[in-house]
Image (cartoon, rainbow, N blue to C red):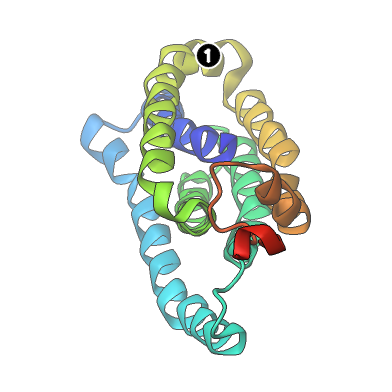
Amino acid sequence: MTVLQFVYGCIYLLFEAFPIVFTEGHHFNTGISGLMFLPIFVGGIIGVATYLIWWNPRYERLAAEFAPAPVPPEYRLEQAMWAAPIFAASFFWFGWTSYPDINYWAPMTAGGGIGFATVWIFLALFNYIIDAYLFVAASALAANTVIRSIFGASFPLFATQMFESLNPRWASTLIGCIAILMAPIPFVLRKYGPVLRRKSKYAPSRPPVPKTIDEAV
């Protein structure tokens, strides 16, 4: 899932972007600049809380509706369909409020949207991978973790140069534009996921092939 890797890399990219915006731009010391990450944590907490209050009960109703068959994995993507635009908008918000003469509360608060959207995207896509691959889900998640870690390690390598060369406004706009380009992916999977799973030999959740008369005998 390229979306997961990109989102994960963007979180690590912020460890380079925040010091440029808050330490260099707003002249905060290291301790105060570190506090600017708190909204990401708060946004994540809100994301978890809304999942428990809204999405989990909704999935339980779907499970009862589809029983005895399992709920199609594509229903897991609804969270990501909401979160993807929020993630992109949060980077535009962060970038274009990062001027030193704009109150630091504006770019800091954008972190709440990033944290919130990240939790929803991760929960949606992790659950989708598990439901889609089922008995080989551990292998799918392991492969995803390896690639995601590569993104997380590589993004900070160019983040400082990008934010210093383009400035925080245009660097964040670039990230936001890439996020917009990736935002339709959950929508595409929601519509065409069943077709793709039927074509995959690694998706045991695809409908079983009916036996012929000879096989049945």
Residue 6 figure quarter: top right
Which quadrant is home to the C terminus? bottom right
Kind of element beneath mark 1: helix
Q: Where residue 113 appears, x then y in whole percent?
A: 53, 55
Residue positioned 54% across, 74% down in the render: 70
Tell me: 30 left or right of 182: left
Specify the farthest residue to the left.
31
Q: Residue at x 46, y 74 (%)?
A: 50
| Residue drawn at (70%, 64%) of the image | 213
Above or below residue 78? Residue 7 is above
Q: Count neighbours of disc 1 (C-alpha within 10 A) and say few if under 14, some if 14 to 19, many if 20 or more.
A: few
- Give the residue pinned by disc 1: 164
Query: In the image, is residue 122 above or below residue 6?
Result: below
Res 209 seen here: no
Q: Amino acid at mark 1?
A: Glu
In-image side of 50 versus 1 (left or right): left
Q: Is residue 159 above or below residue 96?
A: above
Q: How many marks?
A: 1
Give the quadrant of residue 30: top left
Q: Residue drawn 70% across and 43% down?
A: 199
